[in-house]
Amino acid sequence: MHINLLNLGRVPYSEALVIQQQVIAARKQNLIGDTLLMLEHPPVLTLGRNAHRSNVLASDEKLAQRGVELHEINRGGDVTYHGPGQLVGYPIIDLRGDLPGKNGPHLGPVDYVRLLEEVLVRTCGDFGVMTQRICKLTGVWTMAGGSIPEKKIAAIGVHVSQGVTSHGFALNVTTDLRDFEWIIPCGIADRQVTSLELEADSDREPTMESAFNSAARNFGRVFEHQMLRGESVDQLLAAHV
């Protein structure tokens, strides 16, 4: 059993939505197997199904000046930011497949999110960053220490349709965290965000390439599938026409 793995580089958010829809449609028809798309986005804000527009602090004019797009989408969660230096993963997974922790005909969405969190916890650990889950706060967080509260290093927001997942996770690798000042990330006002670059051991400084390799490796381990690297979405879809 394998999961297709594609590194798409930097892709505008609207283009990535189209790509996701193509892969989702092919997965639902069993034309392709489970697939993990990983990429970066130019600066963009996305509002999930439960988002409050008030959590976008920057005005429409300010966002337009910065060339920042805003998209309302069907994933769970509130508002989040994507931008350069952030590793974004879109797993297109059939939850009815052979997956760890599945009880019954399909893996539950909450259990699926826990698996994504585990992938990110292990990935952060590869760079010497100890992280954790926090009850009722989806995503991955650094460990608190003394007067320093935990900080969010990775966000998760997913959608499931006909048993097939879309959207996914965003791990801050070398992200310019000042861009998060445009929003209240995920609607959580009393926690800050951070990045692997700020938290990593000095001898394990992350790059987008090393973070990609770590996340791909850990995704395969957590989901108990071999990761099969592909060249492009077009090639993946054409191979199964």
Image (spheres, rainbow, N blue to C red):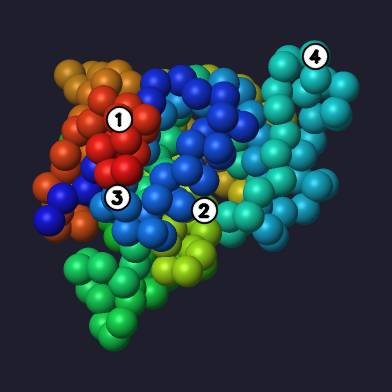
Q: Please state which amino acid type lies under the numbered disc 4.
A: Gln
Measure the C-alpha gap from mark 3 to mark 1. Answer: 11 Å
Residue located farthest toward the top when viewing the structure as drawn: 65
Q: Are marks 3 and 4 in contact (CB under 8 Å)?
A: no
For the residue labelled by badge 4, is the local secondary structure a helix, a strand or a loop?
A: helix
Of mark 2 and mark 4, the one earlier in the sequence is 4
Q: Nearer the viewer, mark 3 or mark 4?
A: 3
Rendered location of residue 208, percent (x, y): 33, 22
**Pointer 1: what residue?**
235
Q: Which residue is nearer to you in this view: 9 or 136?
A: 9
Task: Identify the image quadrant of the C terminus.
Answer: top left
Determine whether 241 is above or below 61 in the image.
below
**Pointer 3: what residue?**
32
Measure the C-alpha gap from mark 3 to mark 4. Answer: 41 Å
- Asked which quadrant contains residue 223, the reply is bottom left
Measure the C-alpha gap from mark 2 to mark 4. Answer: 27 Å
Q: Please state which amino acid type lies under the numbered disc 3.
A: Ile
